[in-house]
Amino acid sequence: MSSVSVIIRKFCFRIKRPNYVLKRPDGPLEQIIVAKETAAVRPFVVGAILRDVSFDSENYASFMDLQDKLHQNICRKRTLVAIGTHDLDTISGPFKYNAEIPKEIKFKPLNQTKEFTADELMNFYATDSHLKAYLPIIRDKERYPVIRDSNGVVCSLPPIINGEHSKITLNTKNVFIEATATDLQKAIVVLDTVVTLFSQYCKKPFK
C-alpha cells in the first residue's frame, strides 16, 4: 500500500518529511451547508478537495483500500465516521448535507444501472456481503442522511453507499472528500489522514 510506504520511507530517512501546504483555490471556497435535521441522525460533516490528482491503477487501488481500512478501524465500521469520495468535476457546490425521508431519496448507487429509493436500498443490500453490516446504522431512522450537490444530485447516502454519478475513476482529476460522523474529532482525523497521504499524487505534491 503506497501510503504505508511513505511512512516507512520517512522513518528510514530515505525521503524528507513532506511540507504540507493548505492552498486556497483561485475561485471561491466550496461549502457544505448542514441542515438542522441531521442532528438527530448523524450530526457532523467535514470536507476537503484534492486538485490536479494523477491516478494510475496502483494508487487508485491504494486510495480505495485506505478508505476501507479506515472504515474498519478508527471509523468503527462506519458507526463513528463514513468517508465519501467523489469526482468533483461531475458535481457542483455548494453541497447540502441533510436528513430526508427515505422514500424521497432516489438515486443510482455506485456500480448500479438503475435508480433506487433509500428505503428500497435497505432491501437491495440486505444480502450484500460487504454492505449489509452497515444497514442497521440508519435503517430504523425516520430520516436518512444524504449529501446532494447544488443541482440536487445525490453524492452519497452515508454511511451506506455513494452515488454512481460522482464515481471516482482513473480519469478523475479533482477529488471531493466528505466524511460524515457521530464523532467530530474522529472525522477530522480521518479526513486529515486521507488528504495528507494522497496529496502526494497531486500535480504539486502535498499542496
Image: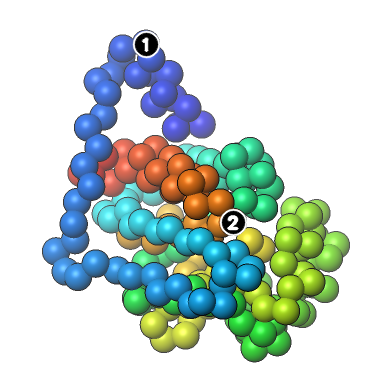
Instruction: Residue 107: name its quadrant.
Output: bottom right
Residue 43 against residue 62 in the figure, above or below: below
Residue 139 at what x, y percent from top left?
A: 77, 70
Q: Is residue 22 left or right of residue 69?
A: left
Q: Which residue has dot 2 on it?
A: 182
Instruction: Residue 118: name its quadrant.
Output: bottom right
Q: Which residue has dot 1 on it?
A: 12
Between disc 1 and disc 2, the foreground one is 2
x 28%, y 55%: residue: 51
Disc 1 crowd rating (10 Å Cα; few below 14, some 14-19, many 20+) is: few
Instruction: Residue 126: name its quadrant.
Output: bottom right
Residue 1 at what x, y percent from top left?
A: 51, 31
Between 43 and 169, which is closer to the camera in this rendering?
43
Q: Earlier in the sequence, mark 1 or mark 2?
A: 1
Q: Residue furthest bottom?
A: 104
- Secondary structure of the residue carrying tag 2 is loop
Residue 39 at what x, y percent from top left?
A: 57, 69
Residue 177 against residue 70 in the figure, above or below: below
| Residue 135 seen from this side | yes
* Cβ–Cβ under 8 Å for marks 1 and 2: no
Q: Is residue 74 left or right of residue 46?
A: right
x 40%, y 43%: residue: 192
| Residue 194 seen from this side | no
